[in-house]
Amino acid sequence: MQRFLGSAGLHKDNEPSVVVIKDTNALVIHALDDAASRLGLHIGQPLANARAMCPDLRVFDADVVADAKTLSDIADWCDRFTPLVALDPPHGLFLDITGCAHLFGGEAALLQTLVRALGRQGFAVSAAIAGTSVCARTLTRQVTGTIVADGGEAEAISRLPVSALGASEAITTGLRRAGLKTIGDVASRSAHEITARFGARFSTLLAHALGQGDAPINPRKPLPDYIVEKRFAEPIATDTMIAMTLSRLADTLIASMEKQGKGARRLEAAFFRTDGVVRAIMVETGRPVTRSAVIDRLFRERLDALADPLDPGFGFDMVRLSASRTEIVVQEQRDLDAHVHDNDELAALIDRIAARIGGKRVVVHLPQDTHIPECAVIAAPAQHHLAAAMQAEWPARVESEPPLRPLRLFDKPEPIKVPFATVPDGPPHQFTWRRALHAVVRVEGPERIAMEWWRQDGKQFTRDYFRIEDAEGLRFWIFRDGLYEGEVFDDDGKPVPPGWYVHGLFA
């Protein structure tokens, strides 16, 4: 049976305070504290009415972006209790604590620990534990600290007002007008009657709140394949202790994966500070890692290269190491095959460089089956495409022939000025590039390359490429973009001369 902890919170303050947001050209209450709630104010109430009831009301403008960031930070902190944490915007969280409560002394101790810790950080928290997430959320809107036993959801919420369900204002008003003021009153009616009057979505919400099924939560992060962690009675802050902890966790993680013949491809170390700040560091590997020494070395490289160094603050009270991506380890003959050793050393070198400067900056080039020059090669992360790069087949160069493609190819072709050229498909006699005039003395071409009509909308024209040498011995790869009187037209439909570009330089 799954167990869910629902929580919602605002900043604490002794004076009545509300947060307002603009809705249909009017300011309405978006959130309020307990002091304002005791005065009879409620979410959705116009600010003018609220001020009439409480002239000393403190009003703050809603900052949706900042609220979302704060909620996300709290969710990161809640990862210490369970890896299955889901957002319940705008102010709530869901924690799936199935099988986790015993680690904290039971459900009551876990609930008390969470509420007290967030309270020390300046939040007023309403939390509840129930067998369904909807029931837990419903309880947090009216009572806090409630723990509902399995099967007791209907009884726990029967006396709560219908507004606790969180349905739309129209449905809540309709229920009250029908004389259904509590959730128990609504539950006493038949399901088809409620569905016919208020819709299937509300009926499903009511059923979930009563413990009759539940919608799955959507965790912020996927559950790692393997996870190990270390909690500290006294927080640690020194680099030596952090390194020792990671090394021991790596040993435990490798031992767990080894039992199932797995190796880690993506690893994440999370550091939980005593003040609630969580810092996560991730490393990836090109091949499944089966040795703790490799994990230890990669994280040392990553920590040493951080632009924003790991700040322990008042210390870390928990360190977690998880393998979010694993693969089955394929056994290879390593004693006699020198190529296997070379590949291992190359993969290890790429992993270390990637851990220091980032995996996207270490690339290999792979050929593509296309005639378009700028698309014939792609740069791919070396960690994930090393094997493909080693097996890639590149076009062979013809002996005693000049290269067909330049050594340096521009990412974006640069325009050149051509005063005149032999038409319809001849080369220019001279051109200007980067304010320098080049007289053409030797030409090879044209090499006509048509664009892939099945991948573009017809806006790219046919190109005629030329290998050109100027009077100073410089060799260029230029092309004419479009055919004379065939593809390039002005707004009136009249043909215009196509453009010329330089695409690369030969050695």
Image (spheres, rainbow, N blue to C red):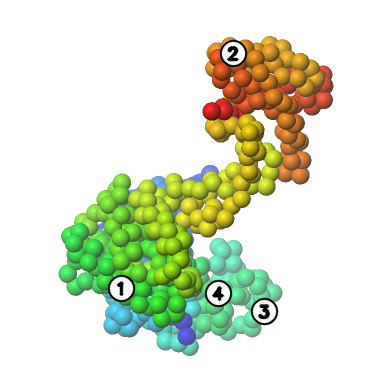
Task: Name the quadrant containing residue 335.
Answer: bottom left
Amino acid found under the numbered disc labelled 3 = Glu
The residue singled out by tag 3 in the image is: 193
Q: Is residue 287 left or right of residue 233?
A: right
Q: Determine the residue positioned at 67% across, 79% down.
A: 193
Separation of disc 4 and disc 3 at Cα? 22 Å
Q: Is residue 161 visible?
A: no
Between marks 2 and 3 in the image, the one whose residue lies nearer the viewer: 2
Element type at mark 4: loop
Name the residue at the front extreme.
400
Element type at mark 2: loop
Task: Name the quadrant containing residue 318.
Answer: bottom left
* Quarter of the C terminus within the rendering: top right
Q: Viewer-proximal residue, 100 or 154?
A: 100
Q: Is residue 120 visible?
A: yes
Amino acid found under the numbered disc labelled 1 = Asp
Q: Determine the residue positioned at 31% across, 50% down.
A: 306
Separation of disc 4 and disc 2 at Cα? 75 Å
Q: Is residue 460 left or right of residue 84?
A: right
The residue singled out by tag 2 in the image is: 471
Name the mark on residue 215. Answer: 4
Residues at circles 4 and 2 in contact by the CB criterion of under 8 Å = no
